[in-house]
Amino acid sequence: MRRIPVFVILVAIILAAGCTTEAPQTGSLDVTSTPSGLEVQVILDGNFQGVTPLVLANLSAGSHLLQLRSSGYAERVELVTVNAGQGLHVSADYPPVPTPTPVTPIPLPTPETPQGPTVKPTELPETPIPLGALYITSFPSGATIYLAGKGYGITPQLIPNLTPGSYELRLSLVGWKDYRIVVSVSPGLTSTEGATLQS
């Protein structure tokens, strides 16, 4: 049997090694929102990336925290998984903001004649101030929420039925520094607070 020279075998091994390509370790994320004219902020892993429509390329494969913020809507938070060599599409649909119904003032009665007895105007009932809500998220999630010294569970959390005004917010998570800030709650609206904890 004829023997194959050693250098021929080495050349074949080198060529075979050169032909192999490493599998990609990154993927992409395509974020859109409807209606198309609505500006939605895209925050990934606590970092602002831009507004929709937005394509994020060369993302490391694995799980990422995606936050979507738009004025007049509650913040959307979800955990997305990016696969190596693949693109992931996330679409957020927002309903139209309801138009407030105008309140027609009730006319006050007028006296029949200037000489007649004075007629007291009808007293209008006091309209209660609508309550507000606060949606709190954190990165990493799972932080204990303290609002005005009272515990409200862990992040992410929606806290409804709050009297409008300012509140001291504290987030606490083992292994991370406490996050403290004063937040404002507006009547009839859901305010959002996204906190990035410091180690």
Image (tube, rainbow, N blue to C red):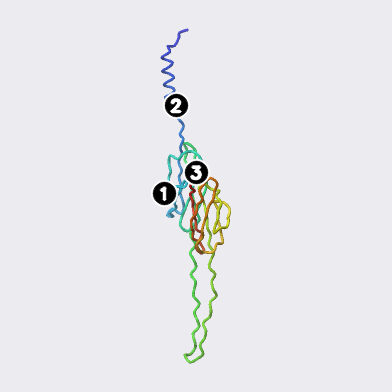
In space, the residues marked 2 and 3 are separated at their CA atoms by 30 Å
**Nearer to the camera, 66 or 109:** 66
Going by the numbered disc 3, the residue's amino acid type is: His
Badge nearest the viewer, 2 or 1 = 1
**Nearer to the camera, 182 or 117:** 182
The image shows residue 31 at horizontal and vertical percentages of 46, 47
Q: Earlier in the sequence, mark 2 or mark 1?
A: 2
Above or below, 38 against 84 in this view is below
The image shows residue 93 at horizontal and vertical percentages of 49, 52
> Left of 59 or right of it: where is 161?
right
Pointer 2 residue: 20
Going by the numbered disc 1, the residue's amino acid type is: Gly
The image shows residue 145 at horizontal and vertical percentages of 55, 53
Pointer 1 residue: 50
Above or below, 158 against 88 in this view is below
Q: Find numbered disc 1 in the image and state the secondary structure of the residue it sits on.
A: strand
Going by the numbered disc 2, the residue's amino acid type is: Thr
Pointer 3 residue: 64
How many residues crowd mark 2 within 10 Å: few (<14), some (14–19), many (20+)?
A: few
